[in-house]
Image (cartoon, rainbow, N blue to C red):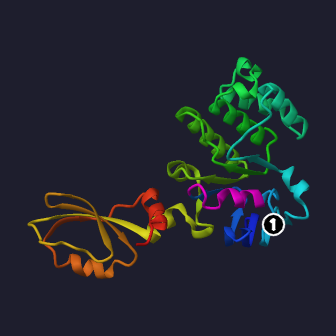
Amino acid sequence: METPNIISVSNLSKYYGSALGVQEINFTVTQGEIFGFLGPNGAGKTSTIRMLLDLLRPSSGEIKIFGQQIYTHSQEIRKRCGYLPGSFSAYGNMSGADFLDFAASLRKTKPRLQNSLIDRFQLSQGDLAKKIKHLSLGMLQKLGIIQAFFHEPDLLILDEPTSGLDPLMQEEFYQLLREIQVKGKTIFFSSHNLPEVEKVCHRIAIIREGELGALETLEGLKKKKLKRLRFTLSHSVPDLELPGASLVVQKNLSYEFLVEGDIQTLLQRLSTLPIEDLTFPEADLEEVFMTYYRKEA
């Protein structure tokens, strides 16, 4: 049986006057998937998220969530979603406890789950008694995470969710994502943080200047675009240049290059060199990411 699409985006565009927000983007997110939406600030991530939740209307295109048009079923859809915005905030004079009570009153929350999340993210009763305007960024982010998760939504839409969390709490958060994914929940994970996307996501879309530059599985993305080449020569070669490769490191007779695209011409050139040792180790996600953001001369 085919896994259903929880999110379907078709030809989505948004313009702010003459300024481009996003242009003609297409992707789907299937049930039980942790989908990474990767790009730097200003690339179009937040605009896309706001359109997914019908907080911002597109200039053109279509969005379906749970098989329904977001524009005509937004209230029904939102009840099944948990949302953590990129800059989470709440009324500053409320206490953390009052905020969670208020958020719970708007949803069918699970008190036992809420208390479990409070314990899990190490918020004490003293922390919750503080006014929100006096909370640290990390504590505020923990409140945001709890309100996004405590009603067991079918779809979580998370924008920079680990901002402000210390490394231990980040790992706790990643583990929480894995646990709810096993239960069949779907997660749309927007981030500019490469290592965390690599840790938890199954597929990744890279957005650049409002357009999708790639949409791949993690492994497919690494293999498709970029390779790392290391070799050692038996003696020096003057003016060593390799087609389609850029030098990263040279130490004595040892070289390291990054290689893009087809390697057939490169292999022909390598066959003429006095190579003693050669490897093609896998490129990491940051190297792949940078190929999409490398500015053209």
Residue found at the far front of this picture: 18
Q: x and y percent of residue 163 in the render?
A: 60, 41
Q: Residue at x 16, y 74 (%)?
A: 273
Q: Residues within 10 Å of mark 1 (few under 14, many from 20)?
A: many
Please state which of residues 197 and 183 is positioned toward the viewer in this rendering: 197
Task: Say how many tags the image has.
Answer: 1
Considering depth in this image, is 101 or 2 the residue closer to the camera?
Answer: 101
For residue 41, side relative to residue 4 (left or right): left
SS state under label 1: strand
Name the one closer to the observer, 178 or 214: 214
Q: In this figure, which residue is indicated by the disc labeled 1?
A: 64
Quadrant, the C terminus: bottom left
* Left or right of 53 on screen, residue 271: left
Instruction: Return the x and y of residue 173 as percentages of the image width and height.
Output: 62, 39
140 part of magenta stretch:
no
Residue drawn at 80 percent across, 33 percent down: 91
The answer to whether residue 54 is visible is yes
Q: Reply yes or no: does residue 44 show up in magenta.
A: yes
* Quadrant showing the N terminus: bottom right
Which residue is at the far top?
126
Residue at position x 80%, y 47% in the image? 153
Q: Amino acid at mark 1?
A: Lys
Snapshot quadrant of residue 252: bottom left
Can you name the residue that lies furthest to the left here?
235
The magenta-colored residue range is 40-51
Q: Is residue 33 visible?
A: no
The x and y percentages for residue 242 are: 25, 74
Residue 125, compared with residue 176, is above or below; it is above
Q: Residue at x 79, y 51 (%)?
A: 154
Q: Position of residue 99 (x, y in %)?
A: 82, 31
